[in-house]
């Protein structure tokens, strides 16, 4: 347990880490519990700060990207403002009818493309 706490302290770079006793007894259990509680509070605070920093960086990044799209690619900014997404249909096989009303399965990409163009 102590080695795990020490790893967390080193990994998270806690500035004033508490020192833990190797063994618990009835005399020191409350003191150690308070130390662990303080460490937990420190970790929670640090995680909140990291989350806020990540959110801030994400907002800044997306704002810069939006400005670049406004200048360089207005179609993307219009699609974003209108909540439009690019919809694509991928055809990897196609069933067509030949001249004698027989159904045929096509898997060749060039034949699929020409049959689709002929259909539309």
Image (tube, helix red, strand yellow):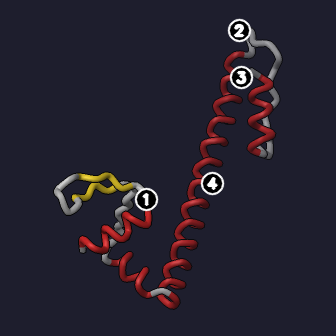
Label 4: element kind: helix
Label annotation for residue 108: 1
Q: Residues within 10 Å of mark 3 (few under 14, many from 20)?
A: few
From the viewer's perspective, tell me whether residue 54 is left or right of residue 13. Answer: left
Which numbered disc, 1 or 2, marks the residue that appears first in the sequence? 2
Quadrant occupied by the N terminus = top right
- Residue 81 coordinates in the image, percent (x, y): 35, 78
- Circles 3 and 1, Cβ within 8 Å, touching? The answer is no
Quadrant occupied by the C terminus = bottom left
Q: Can the viewer see residue 85 in this picture?
A: no
Could you give the CA–CA distance between mark 4 and mark 2, rounded to whole angstroms? Answer: 37 Å
Residue furthest to the left: 101
Residue shown at 78% from the left, 23% from the top: 2
Query: For mark 2, what is the residue?
Result: 26
Which numbered disc, 3 or 2, marks the residue that appears first in the sequence? 2
Which numbered disc, 3 or 4, marks the residue that appears first in the sequence? 3
Label 2: element kind: loop
Residue sitting nearer the eye, 59 or 5: 59
Which numbered disc, 1 or 4, marks the residue that appears first in the sequence? 4
How many marks can you see?
Answer: 4
Residue shown at 74% from the left, 44% from the top: 12
Residue shown at 55% from the left, 66% from the top: 58
Query: For mark 3, what is the residue?
Result: 31
From the viewer's perspective, tell me whether residue 51 is left or right of residue 18. Answer: left
Q: Can the viewer see residue 81 in this picture?
A: yes
Label annotation for residue 50: 4
From the viewer's perspective, tell me whether residue 80 is left or right of residue 35. Answer: left
């Amino acid at each position: 347990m102590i080695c795990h706490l020490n790893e967390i302290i080193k990994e998270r770079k806690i500035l004033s880490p508490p020192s833990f006793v190797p063994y618990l007894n009835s005399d020191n259990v409350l003191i150690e519990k308070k130390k662990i509680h303080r460490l937990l509070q420190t970790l929670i605070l640090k995680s909140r700060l990291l989350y806020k920093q990540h959110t801030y960086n994400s907002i800044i990044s997306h704002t810069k990207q939006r400005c670049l799209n406004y200048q360089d690619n207005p179609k993307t900014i219009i699609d974003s403002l209108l909540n439009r997404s690019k919809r694509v249909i991928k055809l990897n096989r196609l069933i067509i009818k030949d001249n004698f009303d027989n159904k045929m399965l096509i898997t060749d990409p060039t034949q699929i493309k020409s049959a689709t163009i002929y259909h539309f």
